[in-house]
Image (cartoon, grey):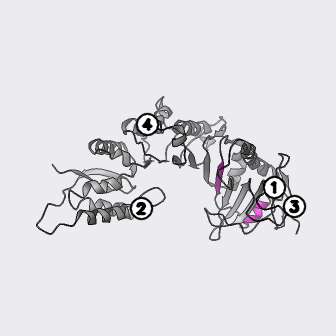
Amino acid sequence: MTPAVTSPSEHLGWHVGSTPLATSSTSPRLPVEVWENVIDNIGSSLDALGISIPSRKQLAACSEVCRSWHPRCLFHLYKRLVLSSASDLEAIVRRLEISAGLADRVQSLDLVCKSLNQSWVCLVPLRLPHLKNLQTLVIVGLDLATTIRPPHFYLTFRQLRHQSLPLSHARNGSWHLFLQNITYSRYAQVNQLISALNPFHVSLASMVQPELSPGNSPGSLCICATNITIIAMSWSQLSAACRDWHFPHASSIIIHISELDTPDAQGEILSVDEETWRRIGVLFQEMYGRRSERVVSSRWPVQILVHRGEGLPLLLVLSTQTDSTSDSNGWESGSDRPGVQCTVSTYPSPISSLRYVVNPTPMPRVSSMLWTTCSRTPTFLSSQS
């Protein structure tokens, strides 16, 4: 019986099947250190969440060369697992059971829900062995609003938490949850999932859909993670949603704004109503109030990234620290002045270059922008140019 090998799938996962491996020959053997270095170099090519797709394909091909190459290739291939069905789950479970130490290699787990039948998702934490080095969990397409879930759906995900590690080690910045294209009608549905997993970083790339549950309020989005990223919102969605957000432990909040409908993106942002800015300011003020209790880990605790077509994105930054140099308003270098910065930059490394005035008037004049919170009440300053 030939051993099972992995092959790439269209969804970046790895399915287990039976493929004959190359037989031994009389050709001269490659030194072990040579082919091990080749395989290791292929496996070191990373993308945002793990080994890049081309490297995965190359590793899958290498795994079919001969039996001795197979374990080394699996060693790299199983850094990231992608499951999209019950059959994927069963195949991966079998592979992890027969290959000693392979479960310890898993650093990233993707759950991709492609069909209406998502009953297999709640089985993932129960069927998989303990993944003690898991750092990233990505959930795509999960329907929390309309599908029927078992009573203990959220509790099962506690199995994926770093329960075997001390809390200080588990929350050292290496436990990241991505929620993409999630369907939910109430914030409580997402809150329970996040609470069960208890991640250090949370990236949410889907908005609440209260229309799926008529008559019910979406409630409040309460995320207790330290670093939070909200992705692909429109400016109008941000204006409406931020009043329902509560991030009690956040030291970094990054909000990605999709391209605005109006041609003059900067004008729409800078002429936004004062109430919207006050809602956003609540997030800033909560973190500013906690600075006396602990050190803020991010230089820019609140960031709003606005994409502007082909040009550079506009980055609005609500900050509790000043730049390394004094600004045009006379603040000294390194002072503890809270404020708001608006910079044109590339993401994710903000480069302070331009600043604007947040002005509730319809036609603001571009100069510099300052949002003071000295009295715990935001003050909107007109431009002085």
Q: CA distance from mark 2 to mark 4?
A: 28 Å
| Circle 2 residue | 52
Expressed as whole percent of the image width and height from the top left, the position of residue 310 reads 62, 71
Which is closer to the viewer, label 1 or label 3?
1
| Circle 1 residue | 371
Expressed as whole percent of the image width and height from the top left, the position of residue 145 reads 54, 39
Q: Residues within 10 Å of mark 2 (few under 14, many from 20)?
A: some
Q: CA distance from mark 4 to mark 3?
A: 53 Å
Q: Amino acid at mark 4?
A: Cys
Seen at 14% across and 60% down, the residue is 23
Which is closer to the viewer, label 4 or label 1?
1
Q: Contact (CB < 8 A) between labels 2 and 4?
A: no
Vertically, is 154 above or below 109? above
Q: Nearer the N terminus, badge 2 or badge 4?
A: 2
Q: Amino acid at mark 2?
A: Ser
Horizontal relation, residue 362 to residue 255: left or right: right
Disc 4 element = helix
**Nearest the eye: 102 or 178:** 102
Q: CA distance from mark 2 to mark 1?
A: 42 Å
Q: Nearer the N terminus, badge 2 or badge 1?
A: 2
Q: Nearer the N terminus, badge 4 or badge 1?
A: 4
Q: Amino acid at mark 3?
A: Ser
| Circle 3 residue | 382
Which is closer to the viewer, label 4 or label 3?
3
| Circle 4 residue | 122
Disc 3 element = loop
Horizontal relation, residue 19 to residue 309: left or right: left
**Nearest the eye: 346 or 34:** 34
Q: CA distance from mark 3 to mark 2?
A: 48 Å
